[in-house]
Image (spheres, rainbow, N blue to C red):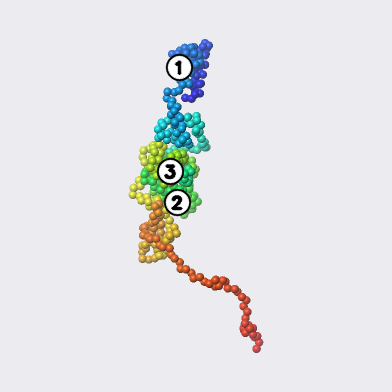
Amino acid sequence: MTKKFFENKQACFIDAFERVHRGEVSLKEAAHRLQISYRHGRRLWKKYQAIGKDAFVHGAKGKTSNRATAPEVKQAVLARYQQRYADFGPTLATEKLLEDGFSIDHETLRLWLLEQGLWQRQRKRQGHRSWRERKAHFGEMLQMDGSFHAWFEERGEVCCLMNCVDDATGVTFSLFAEQETTEAAMTLLWKWIENFGIPRRLYSDRKNLYVVAEEVARLAALEGREEFTQFGRACHKLGMRIIKAYSPQAKGRVERRNGNLQDRLVKELRLAGISDIAAANEFLYGQFLEKFNQQFAKQAHEDEDYHWSAQGIDLAAVFCLEEERAIAKDWTVRFENQSYQLKPVSKYASAKGKVLVRKRLNGELRFNYGGEDCNYEIQEARVLKAEKKAPDSLKRAPVKRKYVPSPEHPWRKSWKK
Protein backbone atom coordinates (compact mmCIF):
# COMPACT_ATOMS: atom_id res chain seq x y z
CA MET A 1 0.00 0.00 0.00
CA THR A 2 1.23 3.45 -0.87
CA LYS A 3 1.92 6.41 1.36
CA LYS A 4 -0.97 8.31 -0.22
CA PHE A 5 -3.40 5.53 0.74
CA PHE A 6 -2.49 5.77 4.43
CA GLU A 7 -2.72 9.56 4.33
CA ASN A 8 -6.25 9.37 2.89
CA LYS A 9 -7.24 6.75 5.46
CA GLN A 10 -5.91 8.94 8.29
CA ALA A 11 -7.87 11.94 6.98
CA CYS A 12 -11.10 9.89 6.96
CA PHE A 13 -10.65 8.84 10.59
CA ILE A 14 -9.92 12.40 11.72
CA ASP A 15 -12.98 13.74 9.91
CA ALA A 16 -15.26 11.03 11.37
CA PHE A 17 -14.19 11.54 14.97
CA GLU A 18 -14.34 15.32 14.68
CA ARG A 19 -17.97 14.92 13.62
CA VAL A 20 -18.54 12.68 16.68
CA HIS A 21 -16.94 15.38 18.83
CA ARG A 22 -19.30 18.00 17.38
CA GLY A 23 -22.29 15.72 18.02
CA GLU A 24 -23.22 15.39 14.34
CA VAL A 25 -23.06 11.56 14.37
CA SER A 26 -22.94 8.90 17.04
CA LEU A 27 -19.84 6.80 17.74
CA LYS A 28 -21.71 3.73 16.50
CA GLU A 29 -22.54 5.42 13.15
CA ALA A 30 -18.93 6.62 12.76
CA ALA A 31 -17.57 3.10 13.38
CA HIS A 32 -20.00 1.69 10.78
CA ARG A 33 -18.89 4.24 8.14
CA LEU A 34 -15.20 3.55 8.87
CA GLN A 35 -15.90 -0.22 8.59
CA ILE A 36 -14.46 -0.99 12.05
CA SER A 37 -16.09 -2.63 15.06
CA TYR A 38 -17.85 -0.53 17.68
CA ARG A 39 -15.42 -1.84 20.31
CA HIS A 40 -12.42 -0.68 18.30
CA GLY A 41 -14.20 2.64 17.70
CA ARG A 42 -14.50 3.18 21.47
CA ARG A 43 -10.75 2.57 21.91
CA LEU A 44 -9.92 5.10 19.19
CA TRP A 45 -12.39 7.59 20.65
CA LYS A 46 -10.69 7.47 24.05
CA LYS A 47 -7.28 7.90 22.38
CA TYR A 48 -8.62 10.81 20.31
CA GLN A 49 -9.94 12.53 23.45
CA ALA A 50 -6.55 12.11 25.13
CA ILE A 51 -4.06 13.21 22.38
CA GLY A 52 -6.19 14.57 19.53
CA LYS A 53 -5.36 13.95 15.85
CA ASP A 54 -2.09 12.16 16.68
CA ALA A 55 -4.21 9.22 17.81
CA PHE A 56 -4.49 8.12 14.19
CA VAL A 57 -0.75 8.28 13.36
CA HIS A 58 0.86 4.84 13.18
CA GLY A 59 3.16 4.16 16.08
CA ALA A 60 5.97 2.98 13.79
CA LYS A 61 6.05 6.24 11.81
CA GLY A 62 9.52 7.75 11.79
CA LYS A 63 11.10 4.66 13.36
CA THR A 64 13.50 2.24 11.69
CA SER A 65 11.91 -1.07 10.70
CA ASN A 66 12.96 -4.18 12.62
CA ARG A 67 13.58 -5.80 9.19
CA ALA A 68 15.67 -2.94 7.83
CA THR A 69 19.10 -3.71 6.42
CA ALA A 70 21.99 -2.52 8.54
CA PRO A 71 23.50 0.76 7.21
CA GLU A 72 26.97 -0.77 6.88
CA VAL A 73 25.56 -3.60 4.73
CA LYS A 74 23.74 -1.10 2.52
CA GLN A 75 26.93 0.89 2.04
CA ALA A 76 28.90 -2.26 1.22
CA VAL A 77 26.30 -3.34 -1.36
CA LEU A 78 26.24 0.06 -3.05
CA ALA A 79 30.04 0.21 -3.07
CA ARG A 80 30.26 -3.25 -4.68
CA TYR A 81 27.61 -2.26 -7.23
CA GLN A 82 29.50 0.89 -8.24
CA GLN A 83 32.81 -0.98 -8.33
CA ARG A 84 31.77 -3.98 -10.46
CA TYR A 85 28.16 -3.74 -11.69
CA ALA A 86 27.68 -0.04 -12.44
CA ASP A 87 25.61 -0.56 -15.62
CA PHE A 88 23.70 -3.66 -14.44
CA GLY A 89 19.94 -3.54 -13.90
CA PRO A 90 18.65 -4.32 -10.38
CA THR A 91 17.56 -7.89 -11.21
CA LEU A 92 20.83 -9.00 -12.78
CA ALA A 93 22.84 -7.09 -10.19
CA THR A 94 21.17 -8.94 -7.30
CA GLU A 95 22.04 -12.27 -8.95
CA LYS A 96 25.71 -11.28 -9.22
CA LEU A 97 25.76 -9.75 -5.71
CA LEU A 98 24.43 -13.05 -4.34
CA GLU A 99 27.49 -14.77 -5.84
CA ASP A 100 29.60 -12.19 -3.98
CA GLY A 101 27.88 -13.02 -0.67
CA PHE A 102 25.29 -10.20 -0.53
CA SER A 103 21.72 -11.48 -0.23
CA ILE A 104 19.43 -8.60 -1.18
CA ASP A 105 16.04 -8.38 -2.89
CA HIS A 106 16.04 -6.80 -6.34
CA GLU A 107 13.26 -4.36 -5.38
CA THR A 108 15.22 -3.19 -2.33
CA LEU A 109 18.30 -2.66 -4.49
CA ARG A 110 16.20 -0.78 -7.05
CA LEU A 111 14.95 1.65 -4.37
CA TRP A 112 18.49 2.16 -3.06
CA LEU A 113 19.81 2.87 -6.57
CA LEU A 114 16.99 5.32 -7.28
CA GLU A 115 17.64 7.03 -3.96
CA GLN A 116 21.34 7.43 -4.81
CA GLY A 117 20.67 8.37 -8.46
CA LEU A 118 22.67 5.36 -9.71
CA TRP A 119 19.99 3.86 -11.94
CA GLN A 120 17.02 5.03 -13.95
CA ARG A 121 14.56 2.93 -15.85
CA GLN A 122 14.30 3.83 -19.55
CA ARG A 123 10.97 2.65 -20.89
CA LYS A 124 10.57 2.11 -24.63
CA ARG A 125 6.97 2.45 -25.63
CA GLN A 126 5.86 1.24 -29.05
CA GLY A 127 2.57 0.99 -30.83
CA HIS A 128 0.22 -1.82 -29.87
CA ARG A 129 0.34 -5.03 -31.90
CA SER A 130 -1.94 -8.02 -31.66
CA TRP A 131 -0.71 -10.72 -29.28
CA ARG A 132 -0.12 -14.28 -30.47
CA GLU A 133 -0.41 -17.13 -28.01
CA ARG A 134 2.55 -19.44 -27.59
CA LYS A 135 2.50 -22.81 -29.31
CA ALA A 136 1.28 -25.56 -27.03
CA HIS A 137 4.04 -28.16 -27.55
CA PHE A 138 7.80 -28.17 -27.21
CA GLY A 139 9.29 -28.48 -30.69
CA GLU A 140 6.17 -27.32 -32.52
CA MET A 141 7.90 -24.17 -33.80
CA LEU A 142 11.42 -22.78 -33.53
CA GLN A 143 12.29 -19.10 -34.07
CA MET A 144 15.73 -18.21 -35.46
CA ASP A 145 17.53 -14.90 -35.91
CA GLY A 146 20.99 -13.34 -35.89
CA SER A 147 21.91 -10.45 -33.60
CA PHE A 148 24.82 -8.14 -34.52
CA HIS A 149 26.13 -6.36 -31.46
CA ALA A 150 29.34 -5.27 -29.73
CA TRP A 151 29.32 -8.48 -27.71
CA PHE A 152 32.93 -8.04 -26.58
CA GLU A 153 32.54 -4.26 -26.19
CA GLU A 154 35.87 -2.54 -26.89
CA ARG A 155 37.82 -5.78 -26.26
CA GLY A 156 37.00 -7.31 -29.67
CA GLU A 157 35.31 -6.90 -33.01
CA VAL A 158 31.55 -6.72 -33.59
CA CYS A 159 30.22 -10.20 -34.40
CA CYS A 160 26.91 -12.02 -34.74
CA LEU A 161 25.13 -14.15 -32.17
CA MET A 162 22.87 -16.71 -33.86
CA ASN A 163 19.85 -17.50 -31.67
CA CYS A 164 17.09 -20.08 -31.87
CA VAL A 165 14.23 -20.04 -29.35
CA ASP A 166 11.45 -22.58 -28.89
CA ASP A 167 8.11 -20.79 -29.17
CA ALA A 168 6.33 -22.88 -26.54
CA THR A 169 8.95 -22.93 -23.78
CA GLY A 170 11.47 -20.19 -24.54
CA VAL A 171 14.38 -22.67 -24.42
CA THR A 172 17.32 -20.92 -26.08
CA PHE A 173 20.35 -22.13 -28.02
CA SER A 174 23.00 -19.71 -29.33
CA LEU A 175 26.20 -19.65 -31.36
CA PHE A 176 28.76 -16.90 -31.99
CA ALA A 177 29.87 -16.37 -35.60
CA GLU A 178 31.60 -13.64 -37.57
CA GLN A 179 28.54 -13.15 -39.81
CA GLU A 180 24.98 -14.42 -40.15
CA THR A 181 25.88 -17.08 -42.72
CA THR A 182 24.40 -20.31 -44.03
CA GLU A 183 27.13 -22.32 -42.29
CA ALA A 184 26.40 -20.62 -38.94
CA ALA A 185 22.65 -21.23 -39.23
CA MET A 186 23.21 -24.87 -40.18
CA THR A 187 25.64 -25.42 -37.30
CA LEU A 188 23.21 -23.96 -34.75
CA LEU A 189 20.25 -26.01 -36.02
CA TRP A 190 22.45 -29.13 -36.04
CA LYS A 191 23.30 -28.52 -32.35
CA TRP A 192 19.60 -28.10 -31.53
CA ILE A 193 18.68 -31.36 -33.31
CA GLU A 194 21.44 -33.28 -31.54
CA ASN A 195 20.07 -32.13 -28.15
CA PHE A 196 16.29 -32.19 -28.67
CA GLY A 197 15.37 -33.60 -32.09
CA ILE A 198 13.95 -32.18 -35.32
CA PRO A 199 11.39 -29.35 -34.79
CA ARG A 200 8.26 -29.21 -36.94
CA ARG A 201 8.53 -25.61 -38.17
CA LEU A 202 11.05 -22.79 -38.24
CA TYR A 203 10.05 -19.11 -38.08
CA SER A 204 12.57 -16.69 -39.59
CA ASP A 205 12.80 -13.38 -41.39
CA ARG A 206 12.96 -13.06 -45.19
CA LYS A 207 16.74 -12.90 -45.58
CA ASN A 208 18.05 -14.83 -48.58
CA LEU A 209 19.92 -17.02 -46.12
CA TYR A 210 16.63 -18.68 -45.10
CA VAL A 211 14.26 -18.24 -48.05
CA VAL A 212 14.56 -17.29 -51.71
CA ALA A 213 13.26 -13.97 -52.99
CA GLU A 214 9.53 -13.87 -53.71
CA GLU A 215 10.10 -13.19 -57.42
CA VAL A 216 12.42 -16.21 -57.72
CA ALA A 217 9.90 -18.39 -55.88
CA ARG A 218 7.09 -17.19 -58.15
CA LEU A 219 9.02 -17.96 -61.34
CA ALA A 220 9.97 -21.40 -60.01
CA ALA A 221 6.31 -22.12 -59.20
CA LEU A 222 5.34 -21.23 -62.79
CA GLU A 223 7.84 -23.85 -63.98
CA GLY A 224 6.30 -26.41 -61.64
CA ARG A 225 9.18 -26.64 -59.19
CA GLU A 226 10.09 -25.34 -55.74
CA GLU A 227 13.20 -23.25 -55.21
CA PHE A 228 15.23 -23.42 -51.98
CA THR A 229 18.22 -21.73 -50.44
CA GLN A 230 21.00 -23.98 -49.15
CA PHE A 231 19.58 -23.71 -45.62
CA GLY A 232 16.01 -24.15 -46.87
CA ARG A 233 17.01 -27.30 -48.77
CA ALA A 234 18.47 -28.80 -45.56
CA CYS A 235 15.25 -28.01 -43.66
CA HIS A 236 13.17 -29.49 -46.50
CA LYS A 237 15.16 -32.74 -46.32
CA LEU A 238 14.39 -32.94 -42.59
CA GLY A 239 10.68 -32.30 -43.14
CA MET A 240 10.78 -28.84 -41.55
CA ARG A 241 8.63 -26.03 -42.91
CA ILE A 242 10.06 -22.50 -42.92
CA ILE A 243 7.55 -19.73 -42.14
CA LYS A 244 8.44 -16.19 -43.23
CA ALA A 245 8.01 -13.31 -40.77
CA TYR A 246 7.06 -9.98 -42.35
CA SER A 247 8.07 -7.85 -39.34
CA PRO A 248 10.43 -8.13 -36.35
CA GLN A 249 7.40 -8.11 -34.01
CA ALA A 250 6.03 -11.23 -35.69
CA LYS A 251 8.95 -13.25 -34.30
CA GLY A 252 8.94 -11.29 -31.06
CA ARG A 253 10.11 -14.14 -28.83
CA VAL A 254 13.53 -14.40 -30.45
CA GLU A 255 13.75 -10.60 -30.78
CA ARG A 256 13.13 -10.20 -27.04
CA ARG A 257 15.62 -12.95 -26.32
CA ASN A 258 18.19 -10.98 -28.36
CA GLY A 259 17.54 -8.02 -26.06
CA ASN A 260 17.94 -10.18 -22.92
CA LEU A 261 21.27 -11.52 -24.16
CA GLN A 262 22.53 -8.10 -25.24
CA ASP A 263 22.04 -7.03 -21.63
CA ARG A 264 23.11 -10.11 -19.68
CA LEU A 265 25.55 -11.95 -21.92
CA VAL A 266 27.64 -8.85 -22.65
CA LYS A 267 28.18 -8.33 -18.93
CA GLU A 268 28.90 -12.01 -18.28
CA LEU A 269 31.54 -12.03 -21.03
CA ARG A 270 33.07 -8.91 -19.51
CA LEU A 271 33.26 -10.50 -16.04
CA ALA A 272 34.81 -13.64 -17.55
CA GLY A 273 37.33 -11.59 -19.55
CA ILE A 274 36.35 -13.20 -22.87
CA SER A 275 37.12 -11.33 -26.09
CA ASP A 276 37.07 -13.86 -28.97
CA ILE A 277 34.47 -16.06 -30.67
CA ALA A 278 36.00 -19.45 -29.82
CA ALA A 279 36.20 -18.73 -26.09
CA ALA A 280 32.70 -17.20 -26.14
CA ASN A 281 31.16 -20.34 -27.68
CA GLU A 282 32.94 -22.48 -25.09
CA PHE A 283 31.52 -20.23 -22.37
CA LEU A 284 27.99 -20.50 -23.84
CA TYR A 285 27.87 -24.29 -23.80
CA GLY A 286 30.03 -24.69 -20.71
CA GLN A 287 27.83 -22.89 -18.20
CA PHE A 288 25.84 -19.93 -19.47
CA LEU A 289 23.02 -21.46 -21.59
CA GLU A 290 22.09 -24.12 -19.07
CA LYS A 291 21.78 -21.58 -16.28
CA PHE A 292 20.02 -19.10 -18.56
CA ASN A 293 17.37 -21.65 -19.63
CA GLN A 294 16.78 -22.74 -16.04
CA GLN A 295 15.93 -19.14 -15.20
CA PHE A 296 13.95 -18.04 -18.26
CA ALA A 297 12.46 -21.17 -19.89
CA LYS A 298 8.79 -21.98 -19.23
CA GLN A 299 6.72 -25.14 -19.06
CA ALA A 300 4.83 -25.90 -22.29
CA HIS A 301 1.03 -26.01 -22.10
CA GLU A 302 1.03 -29.63 -23.26
CA ASP A 303 3.43 -32.36 -22.15
CA GLU A 304 3.82 -34.04 -25.54
CA ASP A 305 7.15 -33.34 -27.27
CA TYR A 306 6.64 -32.52 -30.97
CA HIS A 307 10.27 -33.07 -32.00
CA TRP A 308 10.92 -35.83 -34.54
CA SER A 309 13.70 -38.28 -33.85
CA ALA A 310 16.92 -37.79 -35.86
CA GLN A 311 18.06 -41.36 -35.32
CA GLY A 312 19.42 -42.91 -38.51
CA ILE A 313 19.80 -39.56 -40.31
CA ASP A 314 23.25 -38.54 -41.48
CA LEU A 315 23.12 -34.91 -40.39
CA ALA A 316 26.55 -34.23 -41.90
CA ALA A 317 25.11 -35.13 -45.32
CA VAL A 318 22.05 -32.93 -44.72
CA PHE A 319 23.84 -29.82 -43.47
CA CYS A 320 26.12 -29.23 -46.43
CA LEU A 321 26.39 -26.91 -49.42
CA GLU A 322 25.23 -28.46 -52.71
CA GLU A 323 26.13 -27.25 -56.20
CA GLU A 324 25.80 -28.83 -59.63
CA ARG A 325 28.83 -28.97 -61.93
CA ALA A 326 29.46 -30.22 -65.48
CA ILE A 327 31.78 -33.19 -66.10
CA ALA A 328 34.32 -32.91 -68.91
CA LYS A 329 34.92 -35.81 -71.33
CA ASP A 330 38.03 -36.81 -69.39
CA TRP A 331 35.97 -37.08 -66.16
CA THR A 332 37.33 -33.87 -64.63
CA VAL A 333 35.30 -31.34 -62.64
CA ARG A 334 36.05 -27.71 -61.75
CA PHE A 335 34.94 -26.52 -58.33
CA GLU A 336 36.05 -23.42 -56.41
CA ASN A 337 38.88 -22.75 -58.91
CA GLN A 338 40.30 -26.26 -58.50
CA SER A 339 40.24 -29.29 -60.85
CA TYR A 340 39.25 -32.73 -59.57
CA GLN A 341 39.77 -36.00 -61.40
CA LEU A 342 36.86 -38.37 -60.83
CA LYS A 343 37.28 -42.12 -61.06
CA PRO A 344 35.35 -43.09 -64.23
CA VAL A 345 32.24 -45.18 -63.59
CA SER A 346 32.41 -46.63 -67.13
CA LYS A 347 35.01 -47.25 -69.84
CA TYR A 348 33.43 -44.61 -72.05
CA ALA A 349 34.06 -40.89 -71.94
CA SER A 350 31.58 -38.78 -70.03
CA ALA A 351 28.78 -37.37 -72.18
CA LYS A 352 29.22 -34.03 -70.42
CA GLY A 353 26.78 -34.99 -67.70
CA LYS A 354 26.21 -33.30 -64.34
CA VAL A 355 27.71 -34.11 -60.97
CA LEU A 356 26.37 -32.93 -57.60
CA VAL A 357 29.14 -31.48 -55.44
CA ARG A 358 28.45 -31.55 -51.71
CA LYS A 359 30.71 -29.51 -49.44
CA ARG A 360 30.24 -30.45 -45.78
CA LEU A 361 30.64 -28.02 -42.91
CA ASN A 362 34.02 -29.52 -42.02
CA GLY A 363 35.28 -28.79 -45.55
CA GLU A 364 35.02 -32.36 -46.85
CA LEU A 365 33.94 -32.73 -50.51
CA ARG A 366 31.69 -35.42 -52.01
CA PHE A 367 31.02 -35.82 -55.75
CA ASN A 368 27.72 -37.59 -56.42
CA TYR A 369 27.18 -38.93 -59.95
CA GLY A 370 24.11 -40.98 -60.81
CA GLY A 371 23.14 -41.27 -57.15
CA GLU A 372 26.50 -42.64 -56.00
CA ASP A 373 29.56 -40.94 -54.52
CA CYS A 374 32.65 -41.08 -56.75
CA ASN A 375 36.25 -41.43 -55.72
CA TYR A 376 38.37 -38.49 -56.77
CA GLU A 377 41.76 -36.91 -56.49
CA ILE A 378 42.93 -33.34 -56.80
CA GLN A 379 44.31 -32.62 -60.24
CA GLU A 380 47.38 -30.48 -60.59
CA ALA A 381 46.97 -27.25 -62.46
CA ARG A 382 47.53 -27.66 -66.17
CA VAL A 383 50.54 -25.80 -67.55
CA LEU A 384 49.86 -24.13 -70.88
CA LYS A 385 52.61 -24.25 -73.54
CA ALA A 386 54.54 -21.02 -73.74
CA GLU A 387 53.93 -19.18 -76.98
CA LYS A 388 56.93 -18.28 -79.11
CA LYS A 389 57.56 -14.61 -79.10
CA ALA A 390 57.60 -13.05 -82.56
CA PRO A 391 60.02 -10.26 -83.43
CA ASP A 392 58.71 -6.79 -82.91
CA SER A 393 59.04 -6.07 -86.64
CA LEU A 394 56.64 -8.88 -87.47
CA LYS A 395 54.15 -7.77 -84.87
CA ARG A 396 53.79 -4.39 -86.57
CA ALA A 397 50.99 -4.06 -89.06
CA PRO A 398 52.31 -3.87 -92.72
CA VAL A 399 52.20 -0.42 -94.30
CA LYS A 400 49.94 -0.31 -97.36
CA ARG A 401 51.59 1.41 -100.36
CA LYS A 402 50.08 2.52 -103.61
CA TYR A 403 50.70 0.00 -106.42
CA VAL A 404 52.84 1.40 -109.25
CA PRO A 405 53.21 -0.84 -112.37
CA SER A 406 56.66 -1.34 -113.89
CA PRO A 407 57.53 0.41 -117.21
CA GLU A 408 57.32 -2.89 -119.06
CA HIS A 409 54.01 -3.84 -117.59
CA PRO A 410 51.41 -4.78 -120.23
CA TRP A 411 49.25 -1.99 -118.94
CA ARG A 412 51.87 0.50 -120.12
CA LYS A 413 51.98 -0.93 -123.68
CA SER A 414 49.71 0.32 -126.40
CA TRP A 415 47.16 -2.00 -127.81
CA LYS A 416 47.80 -0.61 -131.33
CA LYS A 417 50.16 -2.62 -133.50
Residue 15 versus residue 212 in the image, above or below = above
| Residue type (three-letter) at the residue carrying disc 1 | Ile
- At mark 1, the secondary structure is loop
Foreground residue among 383 and 41: 383
Q: Which residue is painted at 66% across and 87% down in the image?
A: 416
Q: Quadrant of the C terminus?
A: bottom right
Residue that mark 2 sits on: 229
Query: Which dot, 3 or 2, sits closer to the camera?
Result: 3
Task: Determine which quarter of the picture holds residue 359.
Answer: bottom left
Rendered location of residue 82, percent (x, y): 47, 34
Taking depth in this image into account, of 308 and 263 the one nearest to the observer is: 263
Q: Residue at x 49, y 52 (%)?
A: 216
Number of the front mark, 3 or 1: 3
| Left or right, residue 39 beside residue 405 | left
Q: Nearer the viewer, residue 187 or 285?
A: 285
Alpha carbon separation for disc pair 3 and 2: 34 Å
Measure the C-alpha gap from mark 3 to mark 1. Answer: 63 Å
- Res. 36 mark: 1
Instruction: Report the amino acid beneath label 3.
Output: Ile
Whichever of labels 3 and 2 marks the residue nearer the N terminus, that label is: 2
Q: Position of residue 250 (x, y in %)?
A: 47, 41
Up/down of 242 relative to 301, above or below: below
State whether residue 138 appears in this view.
Answer: no
Q: Position of residue 91 (x, y in %)?
A: 44, 34
| Crowding near the residue tagged with mark 1, few <14, some 14–19, many ≥20 C-alpha atoms within 10 Å | few
Q: Quadrant of residue 355?
A: bottom left
For this view, does 411 lie left or right of residue 85? right
State the mark number for residue 274.
3
Task: Describe the element under mark 2 as helix, strand or loop.
Answer: loop
Question: Any mark on residue 2, and which?
Answer: none
Q: Amino acid at mark 2?
A: Thr
